[in-house]
Image: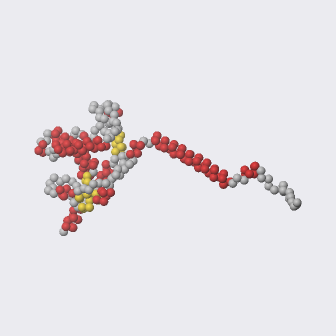
Amino acid sequence: MPAFDYAPVSQEGPDIGEKDALLSIPRTRLSVRWKRVLFILSAAFMGSLCANVFFVYRQLFKPWELLDELPTQFASLRRNIPTEILSSSNFDSLNRTVQDAAWSDPDMEPWNGFLALDEEYAMAQGLPHSQRWPWDTSKGVYIMTSSHELHCVRVLRELVNNDHDGVPDAERRWHYPHLMHCLNILRESVVCNANDTPLYIGRLHKNIYEEHPRAGTGTMKMCRDWSKLLSWSRARSACYRPVDSAENEIDRYKTCPDGTRPWEQMEQIEE
């Protein structure tokens, strides 16, 4: 029988027990696990923070107020001019001299709204092709909506005063068809804008001593800057102004607010 040699197992080597086995788990596995936990907690915290910010935002800010901050497409106007609704003004004064002076303000003339716009700009803004400006055929002539409506308001005022003064029909500038056209223009504007702001009525607030109280007197409303609009339109003016004595329509485009005379360049080219 072959002989076998047995060597005793050394008792001095490392004793790998249960405790040491647990401690020998790689640290990388634990760190990945903690990173995942921290990521989940951070995401939950950020989500909660955003939700609370949004809740506070909804409580403090009204969505409809944000609309006032949006600029208009062309002149970049915002509703940032606080304006009080008055019970009366010079524009509705029964004193004709005062009334006429108010309506004669150059800023109230609708001709300020006649524009000469570059064709490329007009197309980029989605505007339809328009009548050519006589001094530069690369530009089209447009009238701002507000100026068109202001023209109609002035037409109605003139007709009302004509009736009040008993002016004969033959001496009037505007007649029934144009009157009805202007009434419809203003009706369309009212319906299109559909202003839903309630106005109080009765002898209350600033109407308390009024014999004939008017709706909303003293109420503040946010308006756009008319002066800024005029500056924008005058910088793009078509130089238009109706001239009763003008035989040719082209002569109506010879009143530029900046004093320039673009027709002279055309005359030089023709020569």
In the picture, residue 67 is in which quadrant?
A: top left
* Colour pattern: secondary structure
In the picture, residue 184 is in which quadrant?
A: top left
Point out residue 127 in the picture as x, y percentages from the top left corner.
29, 54
Point out residue 14 in the picture as x, y percentages from the top left corner.
79, 55
In the picture, residue 197 is in which quadrant?
A: top left
Point out residue 139 in the picture as x, y percentages from the top left corner.
26, 59
Q: Is residue 135 visible?
A: yes
Left or right, 268 with reference to 87: left
Point out residue 39 in the picture as x, y percentages from the top left corner.
59, 49
Quadrant (top left, top right, bottom left, bottom right) of the N terminus: bottom right
In front of the other: 33 or 63: 33
In front of the other: 217 or 90: 217
**Residue for point 74% across, 51% down:** 21
**Residue for point 81% across, 56% down:** 13
Q: Is residue 235 visible?
A: no
In front of the other: 270 or 184: 184
